[in-house]
Amino acid sequence: MPDSTYEGETPAKASEPDETLMARFRDGAEEGFQAVFNRYSAHVINFIYRFLKSQEESEDLAQEVFLRIYRAKERYDPSRPFRPWLFSIASRLVSNRLRDRKRHPHDSIDQRTEMESGESLPRQIPDSPADRPAELIEKKTIALTVQKALDALPETQRMAVLLARFQGMSHEEIAVSLATSVSAVKSLLFRSRQTLKEALGPYVQSDSIPEK
């Protein structure tokens, strides 16, 4: 991935819309791509990680997401919202990888070991210096319970929840990301909300599960 600007380029501003940055990239400004990469790479890695449970594999797949965007610059349409397009690529690649794992289950043994070791917990709830041991145990117990409840959701429901809750996407944006209809998104979120409420019980407030 490019990591520098060429001579005479105008540095990207933090407030510049994604679509403006991508339009600049399409027109030859490599730093436009670098700006959206810096803005979204951690989000994409975290999204993928919640399905694959492997840091290395998630980073590799995120690189593939941005590589596809990089190669598509000539075809980019600035009138098309960037973020749903980005996560539509990520969602498709995740689905493909999960299907590959089902066909070749022996290839995912290392990933399952990483998930079961509990190494995913620090990515979700960082410890505060003020936390006491009992509080740390409670936080990590809750985090593990929430993660297991999310993992138990059907793949598309889980994607809809993650995009709504952690990316703050609207129904319309999620529909584009998942290549489905707005009504289907509403149904996915409704069903996932009911399932999570039953699974999590007293651990979370009902308003912490997305209704969007």
Image (cartoon, rainbow, N blue to C red):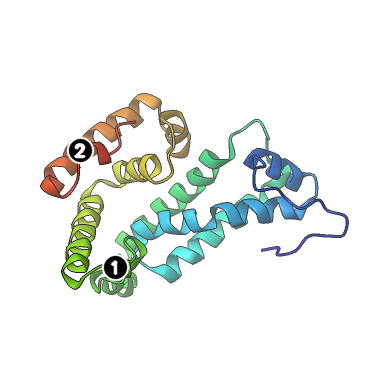
> Quick one: label 1, few (<14), some, or many (20+) residues within 10 Å?
few
Q: Amino acid at mark 2?
A: Ser
Quadrant of the snapshot with the C terminus = top left
Quadrant of the snapshot with the N terminus = bottom right
Could you tell me residue 101's position as x and y percent? 34, 62
Tell which tag, 2 or 1, sits nearer the viewer.
1
The residue at which mark 2 appears reads as 206
Give the answer, above or below, for where 163 lies relative to 97: above
Does dot 1 land on a helix, a strand or a loop?
loop
| Nearest the eye: 163 or 95 | 163
Viewer can see residue 100: no
| Nearest the eye: 202 or 158 | 202
Could you tell me residue 70's position as x and y percent? 66, 53
> Farthest residue toward the top?
183
Give the answer, above or below, for where 113 lies relative to 124: below
Could you tell me residue 64's position as x and y percent? 55, 59
Residue shown at 39%/60% (left/top)? 49
